[in-house]
Image (cartoon, rainbow, N blue to C red):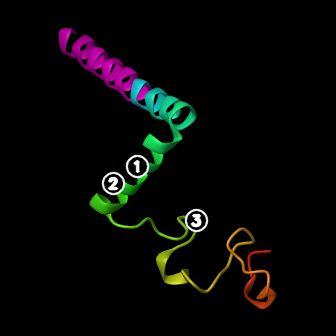
């Protein structure tokens, strides 16, 4: 029984810790946009560039263009519409 309670406490602490991290990140985005931009730049240096789109499988990357990514001069490639 003690092991179950200990596990529940650890899970709750973990949940609260990540909730605080998310709140702090959101607060930084709102209150200090330059610090947020610096964080994103540093994150890209460490982890590499983010994929262009995380909504499609990598093998489809470049074959489908979503409306928010489409060049206005290239309507023929807009297959997601």
**Residue nearest the observer in this picture, 4 or 30:** 30
Which residue in the protein does label 3 denote?
55
Answer above or below: position of 12 versus 21: above
Q: Residue at x 35, y 24 (%)?
A: 17
**Relative to 63, 79 lies left or right:** right
Which residue in the protein does label 1 denote?
38
Does the magenta run of residues contain 5?
Answer: yes
Which region shows up in magenta? 1-19
Q: CA distance from mark 1 to mark 2?
A: 6 Å
In what element is the residue under mark 3?
Answer: loop
Residue 22 placed where, x, y %?
45, 32
Q: Residue at x 40, y 67 (%)?
A: 49
Q: Nearer the viewer, mark 3 or mark 1?
A: 1
In what element is the residue under mark 2?
Answer: helix
Which residue in the protein does label 2 denote?
42
Residue 11 placed where, x, y %?
32, 23
């Amino acid at each position: 029984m003690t092991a179950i309670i200990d596990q529940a406490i650890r899970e709750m602490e973990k949940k609260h810790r990540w909730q605080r991290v998310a709140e702090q990140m959101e607060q930084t985005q709102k209150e200090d946009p330059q610090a947020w931009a610096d964080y994103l730049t540093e994150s890209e240096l460490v982890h590499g560039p983010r994929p262009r789109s995380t909504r499609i499988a990598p093998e489809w990357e470049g074959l489908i263009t979503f409306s928010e990514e489409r060049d206005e001069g290239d309507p023929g490639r807009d297959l997601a519409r």
